[in-house]
Image (spheres, helix red, strand yellow):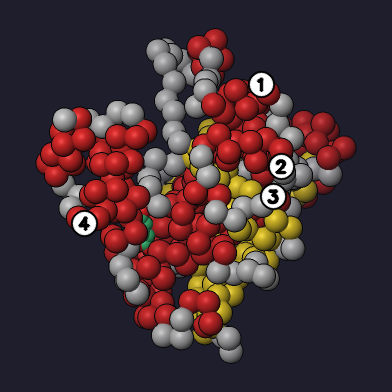
Amino acid sequence: MDVSGFYKLSIEERLKRIKEFAKLNDDEVDILKNTGALSFNIADRMIENVVGAVHLPLGIATNFKINGKEYIIPMAIEEPSVVAAACKAAKFTLPEGFFAEADESVMIGQLQIVNPKRGALERLTEKKINLLEAAKKYTEGLEKYGGGVKDVSFREMRTKRGKMLIVEFDVNVADAMGANTINTLIENIAPYVVEITGGEHRLKILTNLAVKRKVRAEAEWRNEVIGMDAVEKILDGYEMAANDVYRCTTHNKGIMNGIDAVAVATGQDWRAIEAGAHAYASLGGYKPLTRFEKTKNGIKGRIELPLAVGTVGGAVNSVPTAKIALKILGVKSAKELAMVMACVGLANNFAALYALATTGIQAGHMKLHARNIAILAGASSPEEIDAVAREMNEKKDYSVDFAKSVLEKIRR
Ligand code: MEV
């Protein structure tokens, strides 16, 4: 798709290009035009006590080339400048773009056994093969997709409530996020484990710290693109995050701006992603999810984090825009989706560091935020919003009072 000047196009023209590119049908375009239009009937069957639905803007990030393939990336987010920042950072990586890889989709399910009988751990180890065979019965459906139970491990925990056993099943959940598969398996297998261990089973649930489902991505930003002195400044900024938990939290938040926006657009469980990302960052002390280093030609950024995402199941099946977003994205598997998300996270992180270490972020951010302030001041038509925002940017005055005065002038 020709993405040059995509942001300058009218919304109609943008939709036309996306329609052609992703081969969307008229119904799908109507859903997008109707800003998502989750029907009452569907919403009412997704959660409880429904009285409406919430909409977020769906933007498109351009310029992403990942492992040699070009992507058009849907991002759902309320914060201005995140989509623009991703596009800009991605453009600066061209022509090489990003390189990414993902582990198999292995999730871990945890089963807690309390008051196990003496020798339970040894008996579990002896019966490992039988346990795996029994567990496989509950994940047979996954086998044709290359998934299924892969392993089981056992550990003992001494707590103030006594000795407990934790039995952990590794399951390749293929293209699903996997929570339902894992939780069903663990609940079903629990009585058999208790037969072996004695005691009682308690918690039976996946862990959102999906350390066996990590994704890695990297990109290089060259001196001639970002400016010779930017590298040192970015490295100073990065070093602050690496050494200070207060800065590191914001650093990682900037990464999650990108990852969450793709997650929300494509119907993922973004709370699981957030929990997993920050828990992973805190293993051994809270650290940045990215690393930056100077190279011969500029600066290289790398990201690594667990990402439990799916292209089937969950909201992907019920939210119409999620299905359309996945179609636009054109990913063939959950692993590919995870790779795209990691690259967007890295791009947003680089964009934030670059802006913060050089010009500061407020100039660019406020320019885009001006339209929100214009709406707050009462501007209602697209023409009014644009005119008020334009004058705010010209005068560099972003107060609501100023926006109101401009609006009054226009209306007069
Ligand atoms: C704002 O949403 C994200 C940033 O604060 C990230 C950062 O500081 O690195 C700009």
Find the distance from the CA under tag 1 to the CA under tag 2. Answer: 16 Å
Q: Which mark is residue 1?
A: 3
Q: Residue furthest top?
A: 41
Q: Amino acid at mark 3?
A: Met
Q: Residues within 10 Å of mark 4 (few under 14, many from 20)?
A: some
Q: Amino acid at mark 2?
A: Phe
Q: Which residue is mark 2?
A: 21
Residue appearing at x 62%, y 27% in the figure: 29
Q: Are circles 3 and 1 on residues that touch, CB within 8 Å?
A: no
Which quadrant of the frame does ligand 1 lie within? bottom left
Foreground pick, 387 / 190: 387
| Relative to 278, 4 lies left or right | right
Image quadrant where residue 342 sits:
bottom right
Q: Amino acid at mark 1?
A: Asp
Place of residue 224 in the rendered image (x, y in percent of width and height, measured from the top left): 53, 82
Screen quadrant of the C terminus: top left
Q: Are circles 3 and 4 on residues that touch, CB within 8 Å?
A: no
Place of residue 70 in the rendered image (x, y in percent of width and height, measured from the top left): 70, 56
Closer to the chain start, of discs 4 and 2, is 2
Closer to the chain start, of discs 2 and 3, is 3
Find the distance from the CA under tag 3 to the CA under tag 4. Answer: 35 Å
Q: Amino acid at mark 4?
A: Lys
